[in-house]
Image (cartoon, rainbow, N blue to C red):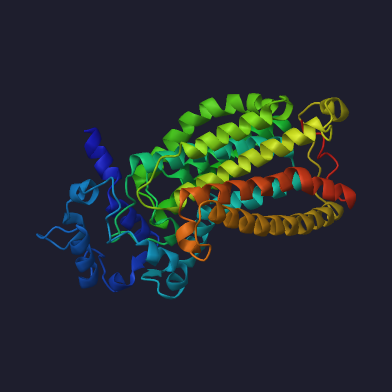
Amino acid sequence: MASQVFDFLNDPQLVATFQKTFGVTYKTDENNEDGDNLSSAADLQRKSSGFYDASSTLLEDYDNSVAHGYNLRSRKYQGHRRSLSEYSTASSKDADNKDYVVRWPFFYYLFHIGAGLGNEMFYCCFFPYWFWNVDGYVCRRLVLTWCLIMYVGQALKDIIRLPRPASPPVVRMEKRYELEYGMPSTHAMIGLAFPWAFLYFTIQRYEVNSNTFIALGVIWCLCVCLSRLYLGMHSVADVIAGLALATLLMFFIIPALDIVDEFQLKHPYAPIVMIIVTVLAALMYPRIDEWSTCRGDTMLILGVQVGVALASWMNYQNNFIPHDAEALVGSPPYHVKTPDLEWAKMALLRMVIGYSSLFLTRAMMKQMTYKLSCWLYKLNPEEYEKNKKQMVVELPYKYLTYCAISLNVVYLSPLIFRYFDIERPTVWTEL
């Protein structure tokens, strides 16, 4: 019974039906009223990749157990996975050669925004803004949540190794993640965990309308989760597994965040412990047979976390964050001041100066770590695409670069803002 339910939820036809409901179809199916018959080209692709039932060309009739049972622990699905050479040039080709039709642009943009809310680069842009302009106390806990949730989810993907929904029948619209495995959906995990943690700590700390924030959190989670089906990147089972796993993890993570944050701020050996833990986590990441973006993104996330931890510890130990900070500003909940023109002007200045510093840091660290890794392991620096997929290059390349960026965000940039007299007034009081 359980296996039947799983097969049903993991059926790519469910995803294809969802896409068709919201106006996404293959170009070859555009004039097909019921959308059941595949084009001859799609049939050939399914035959060559093992997703074909010779008794019928109808999508409903092909054997789902064949689609999901064939060599699950490898990536030999040429019908719905790209080779590495194709992947490296995919983004330029896909922009011009889309094999699908979007009938309703509103949903196209809505779900692309929803997908963006779960991407690593969104958080790499969001966290600096929140640290510089809103609240470091909440943001430190959000970074910890992001790191823990994403590490568990990404590692499980490469342990379970369940492929993404077969294409066709599913239309794949995010080419960057095609080489990753599917279960659990880390977008669904962080789509639930991030607003949960954000709501929990914001409502505790500020005088806000909790009902409004809860409604926004539900909308956020729905947009992120449904975007995975709309974009054809996950099955219904992947999304449900992600939501269930995130719910379970959050019951352990939320109570631990205050303890971990206090440790990373105050303990004299916190920097050593955080570095050892994150490096061990990186080294213990599951080995993969074929490169994907999954491992690199995980190294990036670990780098962000250790950088935030080191910078926060330095701020506290150097007394930039006073040890009696709560006595200076009172105890929560705090009143939320309505943003005015002066706030917007100061925020804009901080963003311009801060992001300029981040881009410079990123460019310098990427060059330094890449060339140093190539020199240490006697690799040809000219073979960039090949080298960056190796663990000995990818780990320091991503980990050290984003560690340096986080140090800049939490430690260096606030000092620069203080020098130019544009710092946020409460930046050093968020203990």
The N terminus appears in which quarter of the rendering?
top left
Q: Position of residue 44 (x, y in %)?
A: 20, 68
From the viewer's perspective, tell me whether residue 78 is left or right of residue 126.
left
- Image quarter of the C terminus: top right
The residue located at (49%, 56%) in the rendering is 388
Q: Say if residue 240 shows up in the picture.
A: no
- Residue 19 image point, x, y percent: 37, 59
The residue under the point 19% across, 47% down is 65
Vertical comparison of 253 with 230: above or below: above
For the point 45% across and 49% down, the residue is 294
Image label count: 0
Closest to the observer, 276 or 40: 276
Left/right placement of residue 10 relative to residue 242 reads left
Tell me if 84 is positioned left or right of 318 in this view.
left
237 or 272, which lies in front? 272
Q: Is residue 262 above or below residue 116?
A: above
Of the pair 160 and 399, the residue shown nearer to us: 399
Q: Position of residue 20 (x, y in %)?
A: 34, 61
* Residue furthest left as drawn: 55
Q: Is residue 205 visible?
A: yes
Quarter of the image where one finds residue 410:
top right
Q: Percent x, y for residue 142?
A: 62, 38
Residue at (34% x, 40% y) in the render:
160
